[in-house]
Amino acid sequence: MTKRYGAAVAVDELSFQVRPGQVTGFLGPNGAGKSTTMRVIMGLCRPTSGYGLIDGRPYPELERPLRQVGAFLEAKAVHPGRSVYHHLAGLAKSNRIPESRVNETLALVGLQTVARKRAAGLSLGMAQRLGLAAALLGNPPVLLLDEPVNGLDPEGILWIRGLIRRLADEGRTILVSSHLMSEMALTASHLIVIGRGRLLADTTIDDFIARNSRSFVRIRTPEQERVRDVLTAAGVEARRGPDGAIEVVGASLEQVGELIGRHHVTVHEVSMRSASLEEAFMQLTADSVEYRDDAGPAFPAGRMG
Ligand SMILES: Nc1ncnc2c1ncn2[C@@H]1O[C@H](COP(=O)(O)OP(=O)(O)OP(=O)(O)O)[C@@H](O)[C@H]1O
């Protein structure tokens, strides 16, 4: 699939497949093209070239769309004066879904108590749940969820993670987008990573973790300059961590400890750490982030000897 807006390329020859029975995380920084891809799949905008198919067919050809695919894409256009119940009942009616499904779905997303409330009076979290209810109304085997945790409180986030996993365990095909690796690590078992509309990775979460978890030695010291000089003189690569601590890659904890001891410098901490998945994701997508802080490390990595 390719989607251009004038000269700008939102989705660039992107190709991937989402399989049933697992949660596939659709990960990419802001503006990477996740929403556009989902909108094309849902027939909400036309691709410049290529296609998005659901169960082998383009969206407009689906006979009973709401029963075949449910989508949660941004805040739904809900009539503000209509009640939660009537919003769903209207959708059910126009899609020939039995009205009994409305209460079932309200129970599924925990909105029974506000069924009579007008949509305009809903909190952000409740509006999110209503959007999800609309996606689940037709009990579809395929679900596309665009940043579903956005706007939810911690309890709501836990709830939705559980719901998504349960829906996948039932054998559904689930594509969930996020710009947070940490969120994906908790829900998805497969990952599609994109940046600037291009595919960067199509892999299992386990494989992504195995390939991207790097360890380093972390040093906290009041003698930054001296420690840096000692490391550089020994040909050890060092960089500045996000909190100002020194991070050493390519040397063991023992090597670093001995170097420090030999030169009698004061340290407050020398410990082994693993880079977070979030960092691995940021590194993978670094070249595809449009406006990144390109200040680089506070001091250059030294390599001598
Ligand atoms: N209707 C449009 N007209 C012009 N450009 C658009 C339009 N919709 C999206 N874009 C551009 O396409 C690119 C991809 O946007 P998209 O919303 O798909 O990304 P995203 O990965 O979903 O990001 P976010 O997490 O910020 O929503 C962006 O550069 C965006 O500005």
Image (cartoon, rainbow, N blue to C red):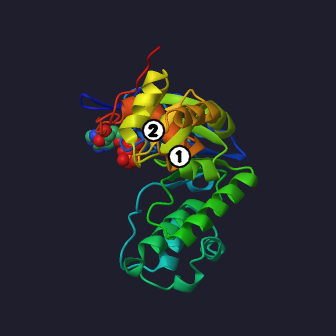
User: Does dot 2 land on a helix, a strand or a loop?
Assistant: helix
What label sits on residue 282 in the rendered view? Answer: 2
Residue drawn at x 33%, y 33% is 296
User: Does dot 1 land on a helix, a strand or a loop?
Assistant: helix
Q: Quadrant of ligand 1?
A: top left
Question: Nearer the N terminus, badge 2 or badge 1?
Answer: 1
The amino acid beneath tag 2 is: Met
Residue drawn at x 64%, y 34% is 254
Residue drawn at x 40%, y 69% is 78
Number of residue marks: 2
State left or right for residue 251 relative to residue 172.
left
Compare residues 94 and 262 and report the one nearer the observer: 262
Crowd band around label 2 with a 10 angstrom C-alpha radius: few (<14), some (14–19), many (20+): some
Crowd band around label 1 with a 10 angstrom C-alpha radius: few (<14), some (14–19), many (20+): many
Contact (Cβ within 8 Å) of mark 2 with mark 1: yes
Q: Is mark 2 within 8 Å of ligand 1?
A: no
Q: Is mark 1 within 8 Å of ligand 1?
A: no
The amino acid beneath tag 1 is: Met
Q: Which residue is under mark 1?
A: 181
Compare residues 79 and 124 and report the one nearer the observer: 124
Spatial CA span between label 2 and label 1: 9 Å
